[in-house]
Amino acid sequence: MKRIALLVAIAAFSVSVKSESLRFLTFNIWGDYFNNPVEEREKGVEATILNSRADVVALQEVTPNWYKSQMFLNLAKAGYAVVRGDEAAALRRAAFTGELTEEHINHEPVLYRKDRLKLLDSGMEFFHLKLQTSKSVTWLVLEDRESGRRFVAFGTHFWWQHNGKESNAIRELNARHILWILADIRRKWGENLPAILGGDLNSHVTSSDHAMLRSRGFVNAASNAEIRSTHCSHHGNPARGEDGKWRGSLQVPERDKAKYSIDHIYYTKGIRALCHEIITDQISLDVSDHSPVLVEFDLLP
């Protein structure tokens, strides 16, 4: 009954939200590391993004084959621009002296709707090249074309291992890295510039990287939005069925709780979270081990 009530509330809310509200989606699209070819899932990922009607989309695990797929071309036709940042410049800032290869592409691009938003500035940084080249943060300073309100959007993917204090410390450094970037952005674009951060943080809300973000004014939408989902964002790998197609499902009920989520959207002062939703339709379950997280925001005057 609780799930039905929540779905009804979200449906009613989506009809009643103000037209100027901003929709932010974060989605780990499950790379192609596990004999899970891009071409078998790209239409589903594309459909999930388009169905969300998101204004900003933070993606994770976008491998080289994803960039070669038809999906980004189709999303461009639908009005989205993709920001990867200058990978070569980011490598130089990280003191990398080798050659730029496909290994160094930005796995965490951010998309935005060009008809709604204007790109003012952007960039990307690698977190720790010696540990893993695929973990980074991408940022965009965006301006609402109608209201003129500005904000910075972050898309990120934190360190993945869970071996205790060592991995927790690495993720805390990932969070600190973003805070340093935000401080630099605000020195250029205004100290009160609001921020939204979305991504696969590979950690629960009780961990030290979350505490670091909260200590600097970030608020978790899953805990503070007016309407909140109670699902877990990480549901396990889809499996190939007898028909050859990928099928995903939610895990057992005891893990169907928001406190176990590792995909998060945070925001700062100057923004109000209206509706937090973890998307669990069959299309999204079939294409990734992560459910997309969608939050509807109000950009305050």
Image (cartoon, helix red, strand yellow):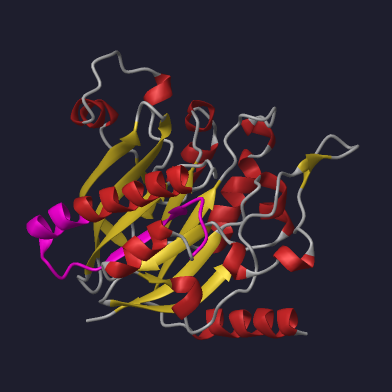
Q: Of 196 and 135, which appears nearest the observer?
A: 135
Quarter occupied by residue 97: top left
Q: Is residue 124 magenta?
A: no
Residue shown at 39% from the left, 42% from the top: 109
Q: Does the magenta stretch include residue 203?
A: yes
Residue sitting farthest toward the top: 99
Residue shown at 67% from the left, 79% from the top: 7
Which quadrant is home to the N terminus? bottom right
Q: Of 214 and 65, which appears nearest the observer?
A: 214
State the image coordinates of residue 12 (x, y, percent, origin top left): 60, 85
Which quadrant is home to the C terminus? bottom left
State whether residue 77 appears in this view.
no
Residue shown at 70% from the left, 85% from the top: 5
Q: What stretch is highlighted in magenta?
A: 182-205
Residue shown at 22% from the left, 71% from the top: 149
Judge whether 40 appears above or below 11 on screen. above
Would you say 84 lies left or right of 246 here? Answer: left
Judge whether 1 appears above or below 202 on screen. below
Number of callouts: 0
Quarter occupied by residue 131: top left
State the image coordinates of residue 241 (x, y, percent, origin top left): 86, 40
State the image coordinates of residue 229 (x, y, percent, origin top left): 60, 74
Would you say 95 lies left or right of 214 here? Answer: left
Q: Of 81 and 86, which appears nearest the observer?
A: 86
Q: Of 281 and 118, which appears nearest the observer?
A: 281
State the image coordinates of residue 286 (x, y, percent, origin top left): 72, 48
State whether residue 252 appears in this view.
yes
Residue sitting farthest toward the front: 165
Would you say 85 lies left or right of 93 here? Answer: right
